[in-house]
Image: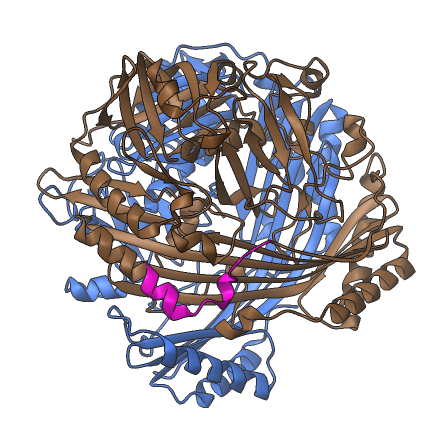
Chain colours: A brown, B blue
Amino acid sequence: MHRRDFLAFGAMGAGGLMLPSMFGRVIAAEALNSAIDVAVKKQLADAAMNAAKGAGATYTDVRVGRYLRQFVITRERNVENIVNTESMGVGVRVIADGAWGFAATNEMTSDAVAKAAREAVAIAKANAPGQSAPVQLAPVKGVGEVSWRTPIVKNSMAVPIKDKVDLLMGVNAAALDAGASFIRSILFLVNEQKYFASTDGSYIDQDVHRIWAPMEVTAVDQASGKFRVREGLSAPMGLGFEYLDGAASGKTVLPNGVTVYGQSYDMKEDAVAAAKQALAKIKAPSVKPGKYDLVLDPSHTWLTIHESVGHPLELDRVLGYEANYAGTSFATMDKLKAHFQYGSDKVNIVADKTQPGSLGAVAYDDEGVKTKKWDLIRDGKLVGYQAIRDQAHIEGKTASDGCCYADSWSNVQFQRMANVSLEPGKAKQSVPDMIANVEDGIYIIGDGSFSIDQQRYNAQFGGQLFYEIKNGKIGQQIEDVAYQIRTPEFWNACAGVCDASDYRLGGSFFDGKGQPAQVSAVSHGSSTARFNGINVINTARSLG
Amino acid sequence: MSILPEAQAKAILTKVVGFSKADECTAQLTGATRGNVRFARNDVSTAGVTDDIQLGVQVAFGKRVGTATINQFDDAALERVVRRAEELAKLAPENPEFMPAVPSQTYMKTDTFSASTAGIDPAYRAKVATDSIAPCRAENLIAAGYLEDQAGFVAFMNNKGNYGYQTATSSDYTCTVRTEDGRGSGWVGHNVQDVSQFNAGEDIRVAMRKASASAGAQALEPGKYTVILEPAAAAGLVAFMMYFFDARSADEGRSFLSKKGGGNKLGEQVYGPQVNMFTDPAYPGAAVYPWDEDGLPRKKMPIIQNGKLMTMNYSRYWAQKQGKPEQAQFGNIIMEGGTKSTADLIRTTERGILVSRTWYIRMVDPQTVLLTGLTRDGTFYIENGQIKYPIKNFRFNESPVIMLNNVEEFGKPVRVKSDESDTTMVIPPMKLRDFTFTSLSDAV
């Protein structure tokens, strides 16, 4: 599911029986604060592994999953919907006759999982004859029985519904009082209770928590017929409800007075700012197209990193496994061997499945591999991809990078993007220092429209807030800005990255890939960065 | 098997509604068997089958609503899910926009099921993969594709006497074929309700031809061009625009269909006079369930007539507030066209660009529905009625509203599915003038 589909989902009324079936069955709130006994999960996993082995599997992994989500959806002064969903079941993946097979069941009994295991073996055997080479798995040593939990302070699922409703109603009232015509605000809370077992000898129990508080504030000027939206500047995070405490330590006031957020979010404060800025957007002058030096805030840059670095460096795309859906990659294997100059020497990009507070952080991935941090781009040169167990040998590696994920027990796991982030500059540099040297530029805050080709060359990005920079000073707010890039030229135009004091995470709950399509949550960190001579177009049109 | 026979479904729903003590109770059963096979690099990569049936129960006490679901169907479980929904309803705040459940309706029967699609088995799926891969291997081309088939049902009942039951099937095939050197890429997609109308061995030839023909693309300057969008290419833009046909957003002043000074553009000339679009739940080959998510009966309705906006989507609440009759949300989108094939449209084109497929379409400005996206998998320069040579892909920044005011000619409509919309659509190939390409892409 893509972001706009989520917002459309959020727009559902409560007049009919409209169940968010894509997220599983709807349950009572109190059931969100519970878990399946680990002994039961082990018993189911063993039943599946034994059945698969008996049917001829040479490798089996079992994922017993309970995926919980809570949505609180509001607009203006109404609560539109409060939904608790649970999706629970078991997915069994096997190798038989050298081919993969997968089957899943929502029946939590030994008989049902054994049946699914035999079905997975049958599917593998049916697919094996047409396969040109057997699956090769990079070895993983079993870790026995272990567990891990996202280091949260407050479990969002345990916070009473009333507190959540009161929070959003306060946010909405503040935005309306500040001049907004409309506001939609949502809490989207996730808890993935994932149990992984494999014939390598691992039984891994993980409890993963995520939170997102998006909003859309709209200003309408009926006389002119113009309207503008300013979305919230929060990021989805791998944190508990403490993210919404609005702690001062999480706030950064930028040189133009805009407040942005790090490890803590003040939703009401941002709603008031959004109302004022949406009104200002209606009156803001339209950008003059041309080449500009862009200064990109981390609330914006995360999406550019995601699309133009994170995706092209996924090995399955490089190899062609995603050719029919998500696409391939310009960053081909020969470029890795030649250490292709992906960006300027200011560009260091790492993949990291361990970063605290990030959406992708887990201790083990969905094929039982211990997670890690590794280099993708070092001093501007391409040095690595993101690969999982059955791909590692193709890259000449002996181990997986630990970035395998499935969004449900009912979907098969595959390679997904790790948190991919731009490292801060090593030299001390603040945002005002960076802007002071820009003669003719645009300062962009927040993510907006995004689109990129199937090999990740040509991209176009918008934003939420745009400000002129003239002779080292930030000027007026402007509108109708989008920039177009060719990925290697863009990253080679990186003229500087601010230091670690400005480092913040952005991210997405809905990175889509695969067939059947799966979503994945992923964060991208950066400090404010400067890119010289980027092509900016004007997006204003007239419908007559 | 995840299609419950009607008698069994009705018996479950009757029990559920009978258990409820709330003012209103609506119960809905949905189930489907979904199968798929995926292949890439000329090998099968994954294949699987999932079965699921769910029961959803929504109850209301006054304007307080509660919803719960379950996937067990014994009497105790059915009563439990009703009680849980009732508990949630009692805790919920009043919804000022609450609408009572729809009373008894008469639904037309629409032809949404075919036994051939419901009968697809793993061997069939494996054959689709083989029929796609083998010809590509033989010609040193590389196939990556996907088949997903589905057979399911919906049954619902409420305590106001409304009831419906129907089964449906669908099958969606897509395949991307690339040349070994990565210089050419072609694509084919075929979405059907009845899989007997589908032949992977024939379809794959389309993608193979485009892959070979698109190699060695030349660069053209970005700018405004006459284009011929194949149905799959046009569908991406049209489907995106249809997300924004909501009357409430327009009345609130935040839609391309808002009128300056207030109100919406219903009845106004929004598109060129050649544009005709309607929705029809019984449309042959593109039928959909005869009810929408609220249980309102779908019927044939004009959406755009000779370029005039005839219908928008009204929620039940907004229709009541605006004094409009209730109407079902669009179930499918049927665009009228002519009788010409894409090849016929090419023959009458002096200079232009043929676009096989569009990709990664996103909103740039909701005020004008300005969309950006790219061409891919076969973009060609046309001169004097003939395809002259393949050209590099373009990024476009174009509004479908502007595009549908620049219509030269429509060809024969076909059923298509856009990459990012599940709406069943029938869309013609379109010849359009002044389509705006803003930059070149090196992607193949």
Which residue lies at the image location 84% right of the left edge and 60% below the top edge?
A49
Q: Is residue A155 magenta?
A: yes
Q: How many marks?
A: 0
Q: Is residue B442 magenta?
A: no
Q: Is residue B232 above or below residue A182?
A: above
Q: Nearer the viewer, residue A218 or B113?
A: A218
Camera sees residue B122: yes
Quadrant in the rendering for residue A286? top left
Q: Nearer the viewer, residue A268 or A531?
A: A268
Residue B42: % across, % down: 74, 33
Q: Is residue A287 left or right of residue B111?
A: left
Locate the C terminus of chain A and report the quarter of the image it occupies. Answer: top left
Residue extent of the magenta highlight: A151-167
Residue B255: % across, % down: 23, 44
Q: Is residue B28 above or below residue B262?
A: below
Residue A220: % across, % down: 17, 44
Which residue lies at the image location 86% right of the left edge and 54% below the top edge?
A201
Q: Nearer the viewer, residue A357 or A5?
A: A357
Camera sees residue B307: no
Residue A2: % across, % down: 47, 45
Q: Is residue B397 left or right of residue A225?
A: right
